[in-house]
Image: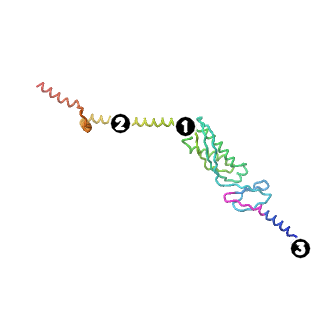
Amino acid sequence: MDFIFGSLPALIVLGGLIFSFVRASMKIVQEYERGVIFRLGRVIGAKGPGMFFIIPIVDRMVKVDLRVVTLDVPTQEAITKDNVTIRLNAVAYFRVIDPVAAVVNVENYLQATSQIAQTTLRNVIGQVELDELLAEREKINSRLQQIIDEATEPWGVKVSIVEVKDVELPDVMKRAMARQAEAEREKRAKIIHAEGEYQAAQQLLEAARLMTQIPATIQLRYLQTLTEIAVEQNSTIIFPVPVEFLNVFFRDQADEQQA
């Protein structure tokens, strides 16, 4: 009994050391995480999800999150191909697909992806004109996604979506675009008016040809005009008479004089 009680503190210390060793060797990572294991400085692979054991002191674990990261690219000032200074920002969505590369090949993949996104945004905007940027936003987004994804591929990072959010134009450019839009609207209005006048002239030409071929239509038109004038209750009515009507009277008078 004296031996047992005498060795009890040693057993407690030994049990504490064993518990600490087991606790230090047991690792748990979530479903969306992976643990990259280094053994004496050399990477041996990624483990997880769930519980696994490592060798304390000898092994070191680095957790990597595999969920999609929303990266807000801060506002950048860029000059377009047609020398227009604009301010714009963007958003990028990416995730780690190779946790070992994300730890070994780059110091901080989050910061590195953010920097390459900002640089690529300025470079791509400098290669397009302002009208192309405003009209073909999807094309610009696709080009940004492709370039950034190729740059981050060695880091084990997959960039899935890049979207340009807001484009801020100088006040002078806004006023110029407003004047241009107004001029375009006036141009379309004049073209539509001219087309209407042209179509109306064609219809009048067809009507004149028809009346020339069928003289009776002229009389019907006169009668219709007389009816319209009479409805307005005018005191004086001027009714045009064709010269052909007067020829009948002139012919009768000539026949009388010859007789």
Mark nearer the N terminus (1 vs 3): 3
In percent of width and height, residue 120 lies at 64, 42
Q: Quadrant of the N terminus?
A: bottom right
The kind of residue on which mark 3 rests is Asp
Q: Which residue is mark 2?
A: 200
Amino acid on which disc 2 is placed? Ala
Q: Which mark is residue 174?
A: 1
Rendered residue at 72%/57% (across/down): 35
For the question of whether residue 63 can be seen, the reply is yes
At mark 1, the secondary structure is helix
Q: Position of residue 99 (x, y in %)?
A: 70, 54
Circle nearer the N terminus (2, 3): 3
Looking at the picture, which amino acid does disc 1 mark?
A: Lys
Asked where in the image residue 19 lies, by quadrant, the reply is bottom right
At a point 68% along the width and 57% down the height, the residue shown is: 33
Q: CA distance from mark 1 to mark 2?
A: 39 Å
On the rendered structure, is 128 left or right of 218?
Answer: right
Residue 227 pos. (x, y %) = 25, 38
Question: Which region shows up in magenta?
Answer: 22-33
Quarter of the figure with residue 199: top left
The residue carrying mark 3 is 2
Classed neighbour count for the residue bearing mark 1: other residues with Cα under 10 Å, few (<14), some (14–19), many (≥20): few
